[in-house]
Image (cartoon, rainbow, N blue to C red):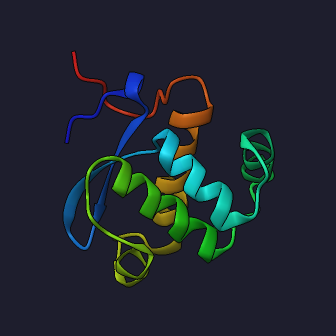
């Protein structure tokens, strides 16, 4: 699946289906609330520690899916499986956070 790194998009395969994910400003606001962060700096600092719980990962993936237009919530994401297990979930989250907070998400495939 092609994604646009300039828009902060990443792709992931969940339950054998390809999805596009993107953390929008609304998604970041959701994450602030869900993770108890008072602002984006606090949220970014929390993510930069590399210490994320399974609940954190579910929240990030769900917000990214919703930001790309998929009507899925945390319970949907919690039930999804990926090939590669926990390491693949962590990669999805890392790619999405890098695309959002990093230098533009070089790990993604950009549309020409």
What residue appears at the point 61 percent right and 76 percent down from the top-left corner? 54
Tell me the quarter of the image containing the C terminus. top left
Q: Is residue 22 or residue 104 the one in the foreground?
A: 22
Is residue 60 something that shows in the picture? yes
Residue 112 drawn above or below residue 36 = above
Q: Quadrant of residue 9?
A: top left
Give coordinates of residue 65: x percent, y percent: 35, 56
Position of residue 2 in the picture relative to residue 105 (left or right): left
Give coordinates of residue 85: x percent, y percent: 45, 74
What residue appears at the point 43 percent right and 32 percent down from the top-left corner? 8
Tell me the quarter of the image containing the N terminus. top left
Residue 34 drawn above or below residue 112 = below
Q: Quadrant of residue 79?
A: bottom left
What residue appears at the point 51 percent right and 24 percent down from the top-left corner? 104
What residue appears at the point 28 percent right and 60 percent down from the top-left corner? 13
Residue 87 drawn above or below residue 95 = below
Q: Residue furthest top?
A: 112
Q: Quadrant of residue 35?
A: bottom right
Residue 17 drawn above or below residue 107 = below
Position of residue 89 in the picture relative to residue 5 (left or right): right
Is residue 95 something that shows in the picture? no
What is the number of callouts on the image? 0
Position of residue 38 in the picture relative to residue 79 (left or right): right
Give coordinates of residue 58: x percent, y percent: 51, 70
């Amino acid at each position: 699946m092609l994604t646009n790194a300039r828009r902060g998009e990443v792709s992931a395969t969940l339950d054998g289906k390809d999805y596009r994910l993107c953390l929008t400003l609304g998604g970041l606001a959701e994450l602030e609330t869900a993770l108890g962060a008072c602002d984006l700096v606090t949220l970014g600092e929390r993510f930069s520690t590399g210490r994320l719980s399974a609940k954190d990962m579910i929240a990030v993936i769900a917000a990214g899916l919703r930001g790309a237009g998929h009507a899925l919530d945390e319970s949907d994401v919690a039930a999804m499986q990926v090939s590669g297990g926990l390491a693949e979930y962590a990669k999805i989250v890392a790619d999405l956070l890098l695309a959002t907070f990093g230098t533009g998400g070089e790990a993604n495939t950009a549309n020409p």
